[in-house]
Image (tube, rainbow, N blue to C red):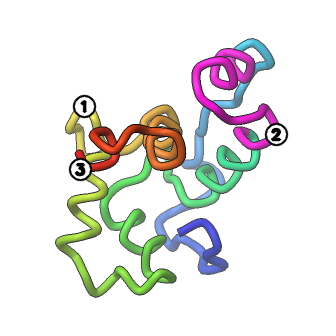
Amino acid sequence: MFCSSRKNPKRSKSKNKAEKLTKKRLKQLANTYNFTEAEILMIKKRFDKLSVGGDLDIDTFKNGLGLLGLDSAAFLCERIFNVIDENANDSVNFDEFLRYMHILIDGSYAQKAK
């Protein structure tokens, strides 16, 4: 997903109003999740390249998963997206995405099985 060199056709610089991380917010995220500040910044940079206005919709998410060969498995993309989209608003923000990455890496088996 994050190795994609394809441009998101829906994204334009004027529409990409992604939240900038303050030093305070960066420290909060590093204290909450098991990532270093540098890792959070790298994840945020990749997320912002894919996102539209600081959010990922299902189509953008599917396009990102295409490099993993998952674009033809729509049910799997949709299931993963729905798990990440905690508030069920059909959009994934950076906090939801980072929380999901944290669970994938450091979560319990129960959390991962969700």
Q: Secondary structure at mark 2?
A: helix
Q: Secondary structure at mark 1?
A: loop
Q: Position of residue 113 (x, y in %)?
A: 26, 49
> In the rendered structure, which disc, 1 or 2, sits on the residue that comes first in sequence?
2
Does residue 28 belong to the magenta stretch? yes
Label number found at residue 14: none
Q: Residue at x 52, y 40 (%)?
A: 106
Horizontal placement of 65 versus 113: left or right? Answer: right
Q: Amino acid at mark 3?
A: Asn
> In the rendered structure, which disc, 2 or 3, sits on the residue that comes first in sequence?
2
Q: Position of residue 48 (x, y in %)?
A: 62, 50
Write down the residue under mark 3: 82
Span highlighted in magenta in the image? 25-40
Q: Amino acid at mark 2?
A: Ala
Label number found at residue 87: 1
Q: Is residue 85 above or below residue 62?
A: above
Write down the residue under mark 2: 38
Q: Residue at x 38, y 44 (%)?
A: 92
Q: CA distance from mark 3 to mark 1?
A: 9 Å
Q: Position of residue 20 (x, y in %)?
A: 69, 30
Dot 2 crowding, Cα within 10 Å, few <14, some 14–19, many 20+: few
Q: Secondary structure at mark 3?
A: helix
Q: CA distance from mark 1 to mark 2?
A: 27 Å
> In the rendered structure, which disc, 3 or 1, sits on the residue that comes first in sequence?
3
Q: Amino acid at mark 1?
A: Asn
Dot 1 crowding, Cα within 10 Å, few <14, some 14–19, many 20+: few
Residue 86 quadrant: top left
Q: Is residue 88 above or below residue 14?
A: above
Q: CA distance from mark 2 to mark 3?
A: 28 Å
Q: Residue at x 66, y 44 (%)?
A: 44
Dot 3 crowding, Cα within 10 Å, few <14, some 14–19, many 20+: some
